[in-house]
């Protein structure tokens, strides 16, 4: 499994992630969502460097230009609800892609322990497609594992890119163990060392879904 850490190189991506993490800037939901989309755009561009292109003759007002163009569009999948702004960044760059959506949540027991549940998936046919699964936080890796396995009901992709704004080392180690590493590439904006007993990344950024859309009520 290849892991590309795009952060820490002194680029605009680092600026976007610094604002995403900043607890004061986070109070502006629009800015938070915009920065998630910007990170999605950066990752969409970086991932495009690995995709197949073909040369195409383009007719201009003055002649013919031969230009590399995407041979095929990927399918972009996101984990609801936190992934929606991040997902939009990918859609901004892959104009004609199809999308898939996965609804996952933490089901808590009275003890405080939880398990991750997937209760809804909507996806186009995925057989022999290039699939990009995006989720802002790759914490324990459990939601990515379940999303990947659930999407296999729609076909077997030829390659899967997993994109996260922030990942934990434990989460990366976990998905390397449980997913078929030969077809997996992971793209992250930062890797944090610590994962709490409740599977929150430290320093992380907090709850991306709440910060993007408002605090939810657990019932």
Image (cartoon, grey):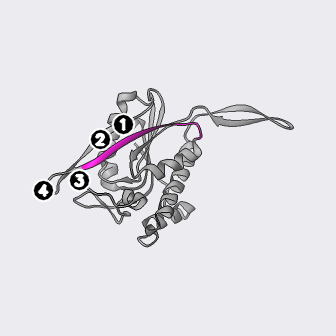
Pointers 3 and 1 in contact (C-beta within 8 Å): no
Find the distance from the CA under tag 2 to the CA under tag 4.
21 Å
How crowded is the residue under tag 2: few (<14 C-alpha within 10 Å), some, or many (20+)?
A: some
Q: Residue placed at 59% from the left, 40% from the top? A: 95
Q: Is residue 170 magenta?
A: no
Pointers 2 and 1 in contact (C-beta within 8 Å): yes
- Dot 4 falls on a residue whose secondary structure is loop
Pointers 4 and 1 in contact (C-beta within 8 Å): no
**Position in image of residue 135 (x %, y %):** 40, 49
- Dot 3 falls on a residue whose secondary structure is loop
* First in sequence: mark 2 vs mark 4: 4
Would you name the residue on which mark 4 appears?
A: 111
Find the distance from the CA under tag 3 to the CA under tag 1.
22 Å
Between 9 and 145, the residue placed more toward the observer is: 145
Would you say residue 8 is visible in this rendering?
no
Q: Measured along the vertical axis of the image, is residue 195 above or below residue 174?
A: below
Q: Which mark is residue 219?
A: 3
| Residue interval drawn in magenta | 95-106
Q: Measured along the vertical axis of the image, is residue 121 above or below residue 12?
A: above
Q: Which mark is residue 121?
A: 1
Q: Which mark is residue 118?
A: 2
How crowded is the residue under tag 4: few (<14 C-alpha within 10 Å), some, or many (20+)?
A: few
Q: What is the quadrant of residue 146 in the picture?
A: top left
Q: What is the quadrant of residue 213 in the picture?
A: bottom left
Between 181 and 86, the residue placed more toward the observer is: 86
């Amino acid at each position: 499994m290849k892991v590309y850490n795009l952060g820490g190189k002194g680029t605009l991506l680092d600026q976007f992630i610094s604002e995403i993490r900043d607890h004061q800037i986070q109070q502006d939901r629009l800015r938070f969502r915009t920065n998630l989309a910007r990170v999605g755009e950066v990752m969409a561009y970086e991932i495009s460097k690995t995709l197949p292109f073909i040369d195409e003759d383009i007719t201009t007002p003055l002649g013919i230009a031969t230009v590399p163009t995407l041979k095929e569009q990927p399918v972009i999948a996101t984990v609801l609800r936190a992934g929606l702004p991040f997902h939009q960044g990918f859609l901004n760059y892959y104009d004609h892609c199809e999308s898939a959506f996965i609804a996952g949540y933490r089901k808590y027991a009275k003890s405080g322990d939880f398990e991750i549940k997937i209760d809804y998936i909507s996806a186009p046919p995925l057989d022999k497609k290039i699939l990009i699964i995006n989720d802002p936080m790759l914490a324990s890796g459990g939601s990515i594992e379940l999303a990947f396995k659930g999407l296999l009901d729609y076909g077997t992709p030829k390659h899967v890119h997993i994109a996260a704004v922030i990942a934990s080392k434990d989460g990366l180690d976990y998905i390397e163990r449980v997913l078929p590493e030969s077809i997996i590439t992971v793209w992250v904006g930062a890797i944090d060392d610590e994962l709490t007993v409740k599977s929150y990344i430290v320093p992380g950024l907090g709850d991306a879904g709440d910060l993007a859309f408002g605090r939810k009520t657990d019932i």
